[in-house]
Amino acid sequence: MQDLPLNGLGFFFDDNPNPMWVYEISSLRILKVNKAATASYGYTDEEFLALTIRDLRESTEFKVLDDYLGQKNISDLKGIAHAGIWKHRSKNGSLIYAEINSHDITFNHLACRIVVAADVSEKIRYQEEAKLREQELVWIKNSLEALINNTEDQIWSVDKEIRYVYMNQAYRNKIAQLTGVEPKAGDYSYQHTGYNNEIINTWTNYYSRALKGEIYSIINESVDPDTQDLLSFEISFNPIYNEKGEITGIGCFARNITQRLKSEKAIIDQNERLRHIASLTSHELRRPVASMLGLIAIMDRVNFFNPDNKEIIEHLLTVGNEIDEVIRLIVDKTFINHDNSPDKYQAP
């Protein structure tokens, strides 16, 4: 190959917007650089000509470069070589991602290669940032999925045709327990084996209300098929809108409130007992206490053996028994449990 006169190539080399250089194949010394190379890497022409192509890389990259040159048998490589993207370091230590393409030439009677090192740093950084964002989104999705599937609350959504779009594991398990069939995405909600027409019509009405834009909650009731316990669920229906403001489906959330209802009923029962106690105290207990105070007031406390005191003491014993009976009733109202089981209901 004839010696290539680079000085006469103008825009092709000196004024090319991409960094370019020529290096000797045997020594890897850089023999010539263009203006874009000195501008991108920060070296002067003289500093560049004191470097080899290894010096543009970190020491950790030397083996990778040597392996590449050996595999490509660079001394005998002819024509264009697409080397891919490499990490370079500028004079100030900043990282440059360079997409390397080269071609064999003869320069100053030496076997060389001319290199075009297109700076793709921004492209690579964008790709890395996009990858990090994607990884973050995957992590968030997995975290939310784990959170949703580790709750006992039941979460599901349906489209406008009342077909399942999403179901968490708690909902799948509950439906499978109630019907013997685990629901799948695409199935019609509450319109398969295991539900009678009454339940299907009821749920069709629930979904229709939400598809018309209504946000509301219901208390749904059923009997656990395994334990026969009465269960109660609070279910909320929320329309799902697209960016145009159109309703595309319904998001549903069901929470088991059986224990909460039991606790609320226990509080109501307790308050009722307290009212009974207050009534007994204010009416039943006050009367014998007033009688006792009246008897004590007329007792001859100076002459205790006054015959009239005997009759008063007998009345005091009678009043004491009345007070004891009232106290027993108060104790009964306070500590004896009443039947506080909830009314019969169905779960979703």
Image: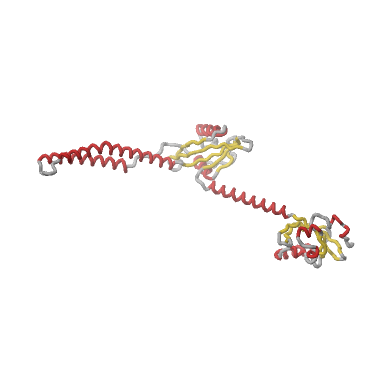
Compared to residue 100, the image places residue 343 above or below, namely above
Residue 77 point in image, percent of width and height: 82, 62
Residue 137 point in image, percent of width and height: 62, 49
* Residue found 52% across the figure and 40% down from its top: 253
Compared to residue 51, the image places residue 207 above or below, namely above
* Residue found 81% across the figure and 61% down from its top: 33
Residue 287 point in image, percent of width and height: 23, 36
Residue 228: in sight, yes or no? no
Task: Name the side, left or right, on which 201 lies relative to 46.
Answer: left
Residue 25 point in image, percent of width and height: 81, 65
Which image quadrant is residue 319 in? top left
Task: Name the side, left or right, on which 19 lies relative to 271.
Answer: right
Which image quadrant is residue 36 in? bottom right
Task: Name the side, left or right, on which 306 lies relative to 1.
Answer: left
Number of marks in picture: 0
Quadrant location of the N terminus? bottom right
Q: Residue furthest bottom?
A: 27
Q: Residue furthest right?
A: 2
Which image quadrant is residue 327 in? top left
Q: How is the image coloured?
A: secondary structure
* Residue found 29% across the figure and 41% down from its top: 332
